[in-house]
Amino acid sequence: MSNLNNILENKIMPVAGRIAGQRHLQALRDGLILTMPLIIVGSLFLILGFLPIPGYEDFMARTFGEAWLTKLLYPVGATFDIMALIAAFGIAYRLAEKYKVDALSAGAISVAAFLLATPYHVSFLPEGATNPVLVGGAIPSALMGSKGLFVAMIIAMISTEIYRFFIQKNIIIKMPDGVPPAVSKSFIALIPGFVVIAFIWILRLIVEQTSFESLHNIVGEILGKPLGVLGGSLIGSLVAVFLIQLLWSCGLHGASIVGGVMGPIWLASMDANRIAFQGGQTDLPNIFTQQFFDIFIYIGGSGATLALVVAMLLRSRSQQMKQLGRLAIGPGIFNINEPITFGMPIVMNPLLILPFILTPLATVIITYLAMKTGLVVKPSGIAVPWTMPPIIGGYLAAGNKISGAVLQIVNFVVAFAIYYPFFRIWDKQKFAEEKGETKATQMGSNGIKA
């Protein structure tokens, strides 16, 4: 036990702490969060379009016309299809904040640079023609959504690094003191903004002379595909979950740190499933999406600790565990488990770290097999918030299929079975401590009376 604590404190925590404090990873994480409210709003309309109610489609068609579904899904396109555009602004904004330079200007320049890196043409197949025709002057919505996410991330960081370099080196146009601050900031951004745009423009011209043709194709081949394979595989997902749990065991927010790297991959997979689901496909392309982990693996929060909270409520002998269980059940239902991880504690606790790591690893394998074999449908691409309570969350994430809720119940039972033996040992220790303290108090009380 002490050896494990020494390893965590002396080997893992210093490295993990440096990673957690890395400004680019933090900006990546916080910038992507900016897209989530829009995606969740779009998902609400997606749910309304595919409610599993007998006669629902006929009723909607009679009431609102045959094109009701197309019109209902307008907000889905308006939210999901600008994911990369919002990320380009959000990541640059957050990174600029870390450097303490004007974040609004950095975000605006990043968006312009991202659009410059995107080819303004789409394929169009005229009626009666056999070969598609390239039409210029149109921004391809696919590259504004999940397909352009990696390019948006890279350009946001490059443009902000160039921007802050010029600002910090004072290579700017200074206005007199009497000029309003908003105008002054605009002129300050002129030189760095010009350099960013010129750099991306030259880069695009060079790339267009190669077989890749666009920056999006380069990033997709060199970065997107390898990371997609990693994030879309069972082994890669198990490694990611293991790292998340290990970081949490050291008291660091593992989901945020690992999510900064894996989040874009899982978001892109989620959107690919959403497009297939929206198109009526039954065999969706991806198993591992953001909802796979948020909804089916982390029931009760990182480590799937809702089962542990229930064990505390039902089987505790220790008063401390009973009271903590009562306090933690409310947040736990909404997948918030800081009262458990820091209050029990699980952090730096060798006895409870083992089930804390093993439980989500086991449920990843179970969930993967259930979806791979077709017993449970794959996540539909509906962006169910991570705070959604169990059963409801599984039902919605599976595209309004009851199999998603059943899988959550199975994973909860597995988590309970893994946690329970370790919990009994911990509860026994706490009960003995409380009993010893009670005896000591009684002896002290008797001594005073004597």
Image: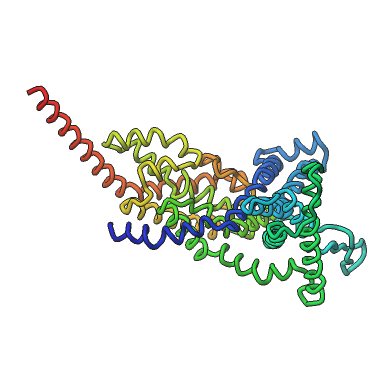
Towards the viewer: 46 or 78: 78
Question: Residue at point 45% right, 59% down?
Answer: 242
Q: x, y percentage for residue 220?
A: 69, 67
Question: Residue at point 34% right, 33% down?
Answer: 323
Question: Residue at point 74% right, 56% down?
Answer: 110
Towards the viewer: 425 or 51: 425
| Left or right: 223, with 422 as reference point | right
Q: x, y percentage for residue 395?
A: 57, 43
Q: x, y percentage for residue 76?
A: 73, 46
| Left or right: 265, with 258 as reference point | right
Dividing the picture into quarters, in which one does residue 442 lie? top left
Dividing the picture into quarters, in which one does residue 227 lie? bottom right
Q: Residue furthest front?
A: 177
Towards the viewer: 70 or 188: 188
| Left or right: 32, with 402 as reference point | right
Q: x, y percentage for residue 277?
A: 68, 52
Q: Residue furthest top?
A: 449
